[in-house]
Image: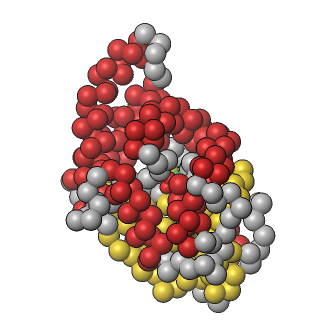
Amino acid sequence: MSTKDLDTDEVAEIYDELLKTYETEWAYRGHRSLHLAYYDDDHDEPGSAAMNTMRLLSEAAEVDSSDRILNIGCGAGEDSVWNAQAYGTPVIGVNISESQLEFARENAEEHGVEELTTFNYDNFQTLETVDDDSVTLVWGLEALSHSPDRTQALDSARRVLTEDGRVAFTDLFLRTPVETLSESDRKKIEYIDDALGLRIGDIDGFETTLRETGFENIEIEELTDGIKPCTKRRRKFARVAYPVGRVMEKLGLTTKMQINGLAASSKIHKLIQAGVLGYYMVTADRAETTN
Ligand SMILES: C[S@@+](CC[C@H](N)C(=O)[O-])C[C@H]1O[C@@H](n2cnc3c(N)ncnc32)[C@H](O)[C@@H]1O
């Protein structure tokens, strides 16, 4: 993983650019998720599989109506709306992109949960808008892979959690530390990190960071097989769209960022198939003390 700092404005800019293609997909699929879809026997088309990822995480986190959820990296509000609708829980969503926050507010209104949801501009590294001891669950659906410093992000999560609070995340992780990768795989990861504003880390390292920042009862479940149909679809789309995009870029009809985003989704699928990347669900409880 690159240790380079990651400017939140850069990440917001990447998302603003990629949202142009996502908006078409959202209209077509009828939802606004920005995460990988989890396929199983009951969820075998893109829309329901995208809902399924949120369902899995809510169930693993044992969300209930007494929760107060903080959704870090809330995207266009889909997972905040999901928890507010399914469980009647109040949700605060934070993001570093004003345009996504606008989408999120609109999304909540469309689903009649605007009273339960609040969307604030805030960096999950510091969570300046969130009070200490104020939420029972910190939820991050593919958010922490954007973190340049997971220790700082988890310290902040711990600070805002109540004593019996917990965290729930899903994300892409390296199966083994970056040092163990071949030069060519390392370059692919760097490309993906740069194109999508990510800092992909390894799963064992994340478990250690969780422990060191004061979390216990850590449960890690691998969900890679279920998201493969989704990454495969994205790769298929990218293979067709990439050459067209290159021509469009020359004509000034699309941008390098969009083209790089396509190439990155192709590489993600390849690395998943090669067993370099995995998709994991992680839950943990706030420990009484830090180590
Ligand atoms: C892959 S998207 C997932 C969005 C949403 N959770 C979903 O499932 O649709 C990651 C999100 O994290 C946000 N993000 C990245 N870095 C962030 C930071 N430092 N603070 C807050 N949000 C951040 C991005 O803007 C984006 O909305």
* Residue 155, quarter of picture: bottom right
Q: Nearer the viewer, residue 198 or 236?
A: 236
- Residue 281 percent across, percent down from the top left: 41, 69
* Relative image position of residue 98 (x, y in whole percent): 68, 42
Question: Residue at position x 57%, y 42% from top?
Answer: 11
The reply to whether residue 208 is in sight is no
Question: Is the residue 256 above or below the residue 97 in the image?
Answer: above
Residue drawn 27% across the image and 44% down it: 233
Between 143 and 203, the one lying in front of the other is 143
Q: Residue furthest bottom?
A: 288
- Name the spot of residue 184 as percent of width and height, x first: 27, 43
Query: Which residue is at 25% across, 52% downward?
Result: 229
Looking at the image, residue 108 lies above or below residue 60: above
Q: In the image, what residue occupies the spot 62% across and 72% down?
A: 89
Quarter where residue 275 is shown: bottom left
Q: Answer left or right for 134 relative to 146.
A: right
User: Residue 54's x, y, as percent?
Assistant: 45, 64
- Taking depth in this image into account, of 106 and 277 the one nearest to the observer is 106
